Amino acid sequence: MGYNGSCLCGEVKFIVIGGISSFYLCHCEYCRKDSGSAHASNLFFNHGIIEWKKGKNKIINYNFNGTKHNKSFCSICGSALPIENKDYIVVPAGSLDCDIDKLPDGHIFMESKGNWDNKLETIKKFDKLPV
């Protein structure tokens, strides 16, 4: 099975081949900081292969000193992109251009979550930007 993805500007395109091993919503301080949100939504492929279809030379990889935290992103638009390491591939769920058949396996690093990240399901929901 293959999962197509790209960055926001379309300069980087890829396909991940393989099955999703796990899907976590990570609330660690690093994922909150680099996503600018309550959590990062990461798909893990333990036996996947990634093929860069376009723009591999436009990818910047960042490793936060002294940690296992890595981030790959497009040098043009800043979109989060997959990270390859020796044991697995991490794919930001939002970078995919296709549907996935897996719900998240869970929230991780909850002790680091933002103090405003509570009962979010209870707040108003809008289909568009309210003006």
Image: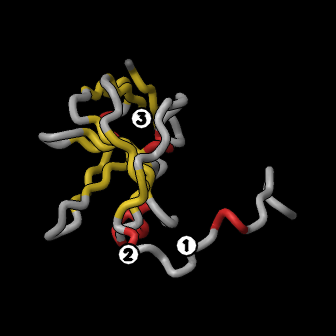
Above or below: residue 39 compared with residue 47: below
User: Do we see residue 74 in this rendering?
Assistant: no
> Residue 12: which disc?
3
> Residue 43: which disc?
none
The residue to which callout 1 is attached is 117
Task: Find numbered disc 2 in the image and state the secondary structure of the residue it sits on.
Answer: helix
Above or below: residue 103 compared with residue 48: below
Q: Do the residues labelled 2 and 3 touch (CB within 8 Å)?
A: no
Instruction: Say what amino acid the circle numbered 1 marks.
Output: Asp
Give the image's coloring scheme.
secondary structure
- State the residue lying farthest toward the top: 1
Task: Find numbered disc 1 in the image and state the secondary structure of the residue it sits on.
Answer: loop
Q: Residue at x 38, y 28 (%)?
A: 14
Horizontal placement of 84 versus 34: left or right? Answer: left
Horizontal placement of 57 versus 36: left or right? Answer: left
Q: Which residue is drawn at 17% across and 43% down?
A: 85
The residue to which callout 2 is attached is 112
What's the CA distance linking mark 2 and mark 3?
31 Å
What's the CA distance linking mark 1 and mark 2?
10 Å
* Residue 96 pos. (x, y %): 48, 35
Looking at marks 1 and 2 on the same chain, the residue that comes earlier in the sequence is marked by: 2
How many numbered discs sit on the rendered protein? 3
Above or below: residue 121 compared with residue 100: below
Looking at marks 1 and 3 on the same chain, the residue that comes earlier in the sequence is marked by: 3
* Residue 77 pos. (x, y %): 48, 49
Which quadrant: the N terminus?
A: top left
